[in-house]
Image: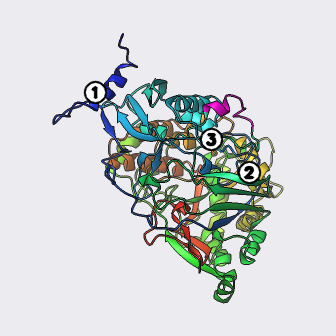
Amino acid sequence: MRLTRFTLPALLGTLLLSQPLLPGDNRPQLKHAISLYGSPKYPEDFQHFDYVNPRAPKGGDLRQGIIGHFDSLVPYIDRGTAAAGSYLMYDTLLTRSRDEPLSKYGLIAQSIELAPDNTWVAFYLNPRARFHDNTPITAHDVKYSFDLLRSKGSTFYRHFYQDVDRVEVTSNNRVLFLFRHGDNRELPLILGQMPVLARHYWQTHDFAAPGMGIPVTSGPYRPVRIQPGRSITFARVEKYWARDLPVNRGRHNFNRIQFEYYRNNNVLFEALQKGEYDFKVVSDPRVWHNQLQDESLARHQLLRSSLHNRNPQTMTITYNARRPMLADARVRQALGYALDFHWLNQNLFHGMYFRANSVFAGTELAASGRPSEQELAQLSGWSAEIPRDALTQPWIPPGSEQGLTQRERKRKVLTLLQQSGWSIRQNQLVDRQGTPLELEVLLSSADHERIFVPMQKTLQTMGVRLKIRTVDMAQYVERLRSHDFDIILHTFLHTPSPGTEQASLWGSGTADLHGSKNLAGVKLQSVDALTQQIPRASSRQELLTLTRTMDRVLLWNHHVLPLWYRPDWLIVHKQHLQHPANPAPYALDLSTWWYQPE
């Protein structure tokens, strides 16, 4: 047989199974799990994750309430809106542990083979892996899934997989991914989270077209009742092929998981108190303080819980820098001075929120204080994209300076706007061509309007018109995909170990693509360079330096205004829902909860 660079790794894998490794051996190794830095927490013979109850009973239902609508069961495309819980239908090559920053363990893939120089990875599939129609999952399905996601999946996947050069099926149970280079240390983990799609189903169906047809999948649940746009119910698959794997022990305990859709938050909360569903994360402090009375909770058999959250989850005002009126960083900075966080927090939110000063607020990833020597080394060479103060001063959210009066706040706004070319004519702020400064805040919930009303009034006194527009969820999602907005309220969801996805969030390469997650329209060479380095970091400390440096660049350019965060999840749930005594710190993992009858 003629050996090629594609067949050689397959032979190495076979040899590994029969030859012992010597000390210092640098050959590829078969692993049960992989971690970005160091070794995975759980050994090969582990029985279950520490944050589950391995003796959790199976049974009962979990009902949840959702705002919006749905018209698809495929959460991996940019068209339509996928039903809540759609991810329950799909298995991935690997699954993540939720008590480590970033480690992944075998699910469809029984073991992983890594190249010493990180130029390829191979996945050996579990021979027991099956789709719901009892068709075996093979390496051909994995390759087909990769090709389908990269050609017809969302923009996110096309960018995510750009460092993969080629995929080769080397046997029915082994698939090989060859990389363009060995610099992206996160790439094997990225590929591990890829959903495996049924080739025999999707070859005769249009993956890119949303619809309510139930595809052939392999996950722990499948839909059994669908009312398009109103309700969807998933049933636990009794003969789920992976139910006894260590990664699933103590998980997927409910017989049925149901999602009911409602018009708005008020209706959603009323439905909870009427017993129409069982579980809600409370993000509105008014609800937590004013509407959740102990007597009412007891009457409806509801409990309040608070679980620690170690994920970055900063609420921000995000500015669309693609808009001509928001292209100047000084305009974006000026708008920040028109918002009084302290007043909002005390008068609207019962002082429950912590002020955020980073897109990674509340975690070690956030930039804080003055830049370190390592950060300064990263910032050198980018003087055209960051102000001089960024090298010597901590970043402070505009308007949050100590002792700032309302008069001083307005003076700051006008000074910055005048510096960027705006002037007051006939009580209106206009540019050199006489065009007035008019901006629109796009919202998906009327509850958020109260956040911007005080800001609207402040700007109005200075000749700036700020319109507030609330639209339904379907229109909101499509306008974000098309970048058709000026200002939005947005939470950037990060993992505790940022990686390749940062280029999707902030990189100029995706800024003008439909469906891009670079909502702010960031186009900075410094950020591009940093997002390329982040997946290549060789240590946790290097990763922290890179994310903190990128954080500083984004903040000093005022692409977003960090508002607030909370270091915990506030939850209301029925008494019969139980969770493990030591829940996962990096996820609100409902797969570990169970039904406990009276």
Q: Secondary structure at mark 1?
A: helix
Q: Measure how far apart labels 3 and 1 are at the Cα level.
A: 34 Å
Q: Which residue is mark 3?
A: 133
Q: What numbered label is drawn on residue 459?
A: none
* Quarter in which the N terminus is drawn: top left
Label 1 packing within 10 angstroms: few (<14), some (14-19), many (20+) = few
Q: Is residue 205 magenta?
A: yes
Q: Earlier in the sequence, mark 1 or mark 2?
A: 1
| Amino acid residing under circle 3 | Asp
Residue 496 in view in this figure = no
| Amino acid residing under circle 2 | Ser
Report whether 157 appears left or right of 443.
left
Report whether 80 appears left or right of 135.
right
| Span shown in magenta | 199-209
Q: Secondary structure at mark 2?
A: strand
Q: Earlier in the sequence, mark 3 or mark 1?
A: 1
- Looking at the picture, how far across and down is residue 229, in whole percent? 79, 54
| Residue located farthest toward the top when viewing the structure as drawn | 2
Q: Nearer the viewer, residue 208 or 265?
A: 208
- Looking at the picture, how far across and down is residue 236, in whole percent? 61, 56
Q: Which residue is mark 2?
A: 423
| Residue located farthest toward the right when viewing the structure as drawn | 426
- Looking at the picture, how far across and down is residue 572, in whole percent? 62, 74
- Looking at the picture, how far across and down is residue 249, in whole percent? 45, 58
Q: Is residue 484 magenta?
A: no
Asked if marks 3 and 2 touch (Cβ < 8 Å), the reply is no
Looking at the rendered image, the disc whose residue lies closer to the viewer, 3 or 1, is 3
Label 3 packing within 10 angstroms: few (<14), some (14-19), many (20+) = few
Q: How is the image coloured?
A: rainbow
